[in-house]
Image: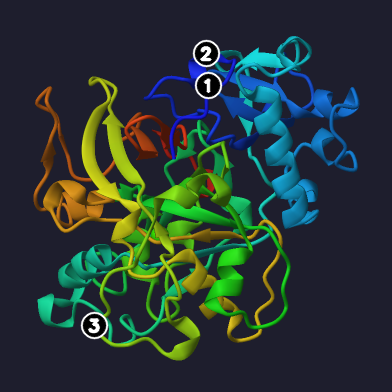
């Protein structure tokens, strides 16, 4: 594949995240008007609600909506139809250039909103390096991976209400923390507040039946970058016996543009070699991961943005399709606009780790920033910027940034009587 040229010149550079090959979908507003559907092209956003209102396209009025749910629900043939029309409208030399260009806004001037109303949110734990690092810290290297880990994707049901769009400030949570002994817990602001670098898959179909891995892959609409904000000290005290709860409930940030599965097709790659053959319902049938380079940047109050980790989506042990096949295997219904978190994506090396917990090895090895500051976990006013893109020699498919700034804790009920 090579760059598809557009009459929007900013979409034709090798380093833009948003060439004509991408066409990601988001919800935007301008001048406090109603949020509506848009598509990103170079540094511009095309207003799809206007395009539909003026009769250039017809998708049952779904593009006037303030979320993508009702369009996605129309099904795969409509997804393909919209993509085909937009490619035609935005291609270099298009007959429609003059008519379409008046329905565009500069991306720097619009406000982005959550692209979907999240139906339900499940977070997995499918990064092997991450699971081994965390397991080693908690249980020692011999017992790093629990015995089930190499046989199925481990996950937990999160809260859809916690999902926020990139740019939303993240308030440090209060929570119950273990005291000096088991009998004296305290209610305090988390001191070990962390990020987790993940990708999120967005489901495009409903199903109340167990699904094969291939069927699960078919039902994915697209992907976003996801930050699963995590309070490690709350997690350490609460996680036995039912797993994470309040430690993961504060917020989950996602990037504002849904990159469709269609745009990612040229970047498919295989899951790693299996240690044990998977049970038939989980077996890979084709390359199910994507080669997506991922960066974590940290900005403190005193420092500029600085890369603290570089990794790749291809480091996962289980694909989103395998996670969904496993999730549905019990008969658990899957819905349009369910969000499926991949699990933290860490590479094998120290500078490839996707959380502060791993980067600072449980707080024992602070990371050193170039201005001399040190970090173990996140401090107030720290900003985490997650980035992802797929590259070829002529174009990139990018996700835009997933940003969140930590703001100080606040809780009326924290005072000791
Ligand atoms: Ca997670």
Q: Residue at x 9, y 26 (%)?
A: 372
Q: Which residue is mark 2?
A: 9
Say above or below: 154 vs 354: below
The answer to whether residue 27 shows anywhere in this view is no
Q: Residue at x 73, y 67 (%)?
A: 206
Image quarter in which the N terminus is found: top left
Q: Which mark is residue 275?
A: 3
The answer to which image quadrant residue 75 occupies is bottom right
Marks 1 and 3, how far apart in space? Answer: 43 Å
Task: Give the percent coordinates (x, y) of residue 175.
Answer: 42, 56
Disc 3 crowd, CA 10 A, few/some/many (<14, 14-19, 20+): few
Q: Are marks 2 and 1 in contact (CB under 8 Å)?
A: yes
Q: Which residue is mark 1?
A: 42
Marks 2 and 1, how far apart in space? Answer: 7 Å
> In what element is the residue under mark 2?
helix
Disc 1 crowd, CA 10 A, few/some/many (<14, 14-19, 20+): many
Say above or below: 302 vs 77: above
* Residue nearer the viewer, 145 or 272: 272
Task: Give the percent coordinates (x, y) of residue 88.
Answer: 69, 29
* Label 1 lies in ligand 1 vicinity (Cβ under 8 Å): no
Q: Are marks 3 and 2 in contact (CB under 8 Å)?
A: no
Q: Ligand 1 shows up in which quadrant of the image?
A: bottom left
Task: Give the percent coordinates (x, y) of residue 213.
Answer: 53, 76
The answer to whether residue 375 shows anywhere in this view is yes
Q: Are marks 1 and 3 in contact (CB under 8 Å)?
A: no
Comes first in the chain, label 3 or label 2? 2
Task: Give the percent coordinates (x, y) of residue 282.
Answer: 46, 82
* Residue nearer the viewer, 161 or 205: 205
């Amino acid at each position: 594949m090579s760059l598809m040229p557009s009459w929007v010149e900013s979409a034709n550079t090798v380093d833009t995240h948003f060439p004509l090959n991408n066409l990601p979908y988001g919800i935007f507003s301008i001048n406090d008007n109603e949020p509506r559907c848009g598509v990103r092209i170079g540094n511009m956003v095309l207003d799809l609600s206007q395009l539909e209102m003026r009769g250039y396209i017809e998708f049952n009025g779904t593009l006037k909506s303030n979320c993508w749910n009702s369009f996605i629900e129309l099904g795969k043939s409509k997804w393909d139809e919209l993509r085909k029309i937009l490619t035609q409208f935005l291609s270099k030399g298009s007959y429609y250039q003059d008519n379409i260009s008046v329905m565009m806004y500069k991306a720097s001037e619009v406000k982005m909103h959550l692209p979907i109303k999240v139906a339900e949110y499940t977070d997995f734990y499918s990064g092997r390096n991450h699971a081994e690092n965390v397991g080693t810290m908690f249980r020692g290297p011999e017992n790093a991976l629990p015995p089930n880990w190499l046989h199925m994707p481990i996950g937990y049901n999160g809260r859809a209400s916690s999902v926020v769009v990139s740019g939303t400030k993240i308030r440090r949570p209060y929570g119950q923390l273990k005291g000096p002994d088991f009998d004296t817990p305290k209610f305090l602001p988390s001191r070990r507040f962390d990020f987790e670098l993940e990708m999120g898959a967005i489901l495009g179909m409903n199903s109340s039946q167990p699904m094969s891995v291939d069927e699960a892959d078919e039902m994915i609409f697209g992907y976003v970058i996801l930050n699963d904000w995590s309070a490690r000290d709350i997690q350490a005290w609460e996680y036995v016996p039912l797993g994470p709860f309040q430690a993961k409930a504060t917020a989950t940030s996602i990037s504002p543009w849904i990159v469709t599965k269609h745009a990612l097709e040229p970047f498919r790659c295989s899951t790693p070699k299996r240690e044990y053959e998977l049970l038939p319902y989980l077996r890979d049938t084709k390359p199910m991961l994507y080669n997506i380079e991922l960066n974590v940047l940290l900005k403190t109050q005193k420092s500029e943005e600085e890369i603290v980790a570089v990794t790749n989506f291809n480091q996962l042990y289980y694909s989103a399709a395998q996670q969904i096949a496993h999730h549905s295997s019990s008969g658990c219904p899957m819905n349009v606009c369910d969000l499926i978190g991949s699990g933290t994506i860490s590479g094998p090396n120290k500078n490839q780790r996707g959380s502060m917990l791993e980067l600072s090895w449980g707080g024992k090895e602070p990371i050193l920033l170039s201005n001399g500051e040190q970090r173990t976990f996140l401090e107030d006013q720290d900003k985490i910027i997650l980035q992802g893109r797929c590259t070829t020699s002529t174009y990139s498919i990018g996700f835009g940034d997933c940003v969140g700034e930590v703001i100080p804790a606040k809780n009326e009920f924290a005072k000791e009587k």
